[in-house]
Amino acid sequence: KSTDGGATWSVSVGASPTNIPPAPIRSIIVHPTENDLLYVGTEVGVFTSEDAGATWSLAMDRPWLDDAERDPLALASVELETGMGGIWIYAGTEVGLTRVPDCFCRWQDVQPGNAMDALVAGEAPPSEAPLPGGEPILSLASAPSAPEVMYAALPSGLWASQDGGVIWQKRASKAATAVAVHPRDETYIAALLGGILKISRDGGATWIETGER
C-alpha cells in the first residue's frame, strides 16, 4: 500500500494468521465513507480489513452464480439506502453481477424495488435490463458523488447504470477492461477501451483519447 499518493509503496499483507491466505487477489476496494475499511476479492473468498490492511478476516465465500462459486473479478462498495447499514458490496464475476449487503448474509441478484424486503421474502423480481449474461465483468465503479451511478467494463463494451445496477445501457462498444470515476463528478470517467485509455466527461456519451483536447 501507499500512504503518499503512490510515491512510495510497502507490503501491506504478509504471512500471518490475521492476513489473507496465499491466493491471487482479484480486486480491492475501499469503503465509500470509512477509509480504513477495505475489501479484497480472492480465489478463496472476500476478505475485509477494519484497520487499513493491518489485519484481515474472511467476510464472505465467493459469489454463487449459475450453480457454482465464482471468483470476484471486480468489487464495488456502493452506498445505497436499501443496503444493510446503507452499503452494498457488488461483485463482478466471469458469468455476471451479484451483490451482498455489508452484513454479508447472502449473495443475491441485483433487482428493482426494496432489495432487503426481497432478501427476507426469498423472492426477487427480475431486472428489466441487466448486464449481458455469461460475460466476465472485469471492472466495476460506483460514483462517490452519486452512488446510484455505476459503470461496468465487459468484453462487449462499457456499460452504465443510473439506478444501482438494475438497468444498464451500453456506452461504448469496444472491449472494456477497466473503468474509474472522478470522485466529485459522476459523468467524468476514464476507461480502457480496446486497449486504449479514453476519457468521457458526459457519462460515456462521447469519448476522447488521453492527450486529446
Image (cartoon, helix red, strand yellow):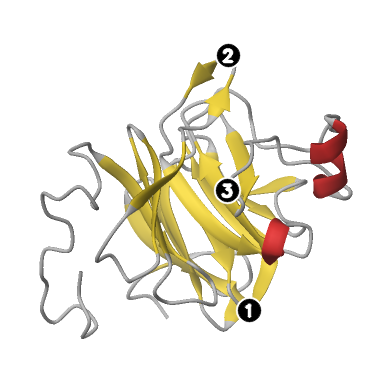
Using residue 205 as the reference point, say whether residue 50 is left or right of it: left
Badge 2 crowding class, 10 Å Cα cut-off, few under 14, some 14 to 19, many 20 or more, is: few
| Residue at 86 percent of width and 30 percent of height | 123
Residue with the most extreme top position? 67
Location of the N terminus by quadrant is bottom left
**Mark 1, residue position:** 145
| Residue at 46 percent of width and 32 percent of height | 62
Report which quarter residue 4 is drawn in. bottom left
Q: CA distance from mark 2 to mark 1?
A: 36 Å
| Residue at 62 percent of width and 45 percent of height | 100
Question: Relative to residue 103, is residue 46 depicted above or below?
Answer: above
Asked which secondary structure carries label 1, the reply is loop
Q: Nearer the viewer, residue 196 or 75?
A: 75
**Mark 2, residue position:** 67
Whether pointer 1 and pointer 3 mark residues with C-beta atoms closer than 8 Å, the reply is no
| Residue at 22 percent of width and 36 percent of height | 23
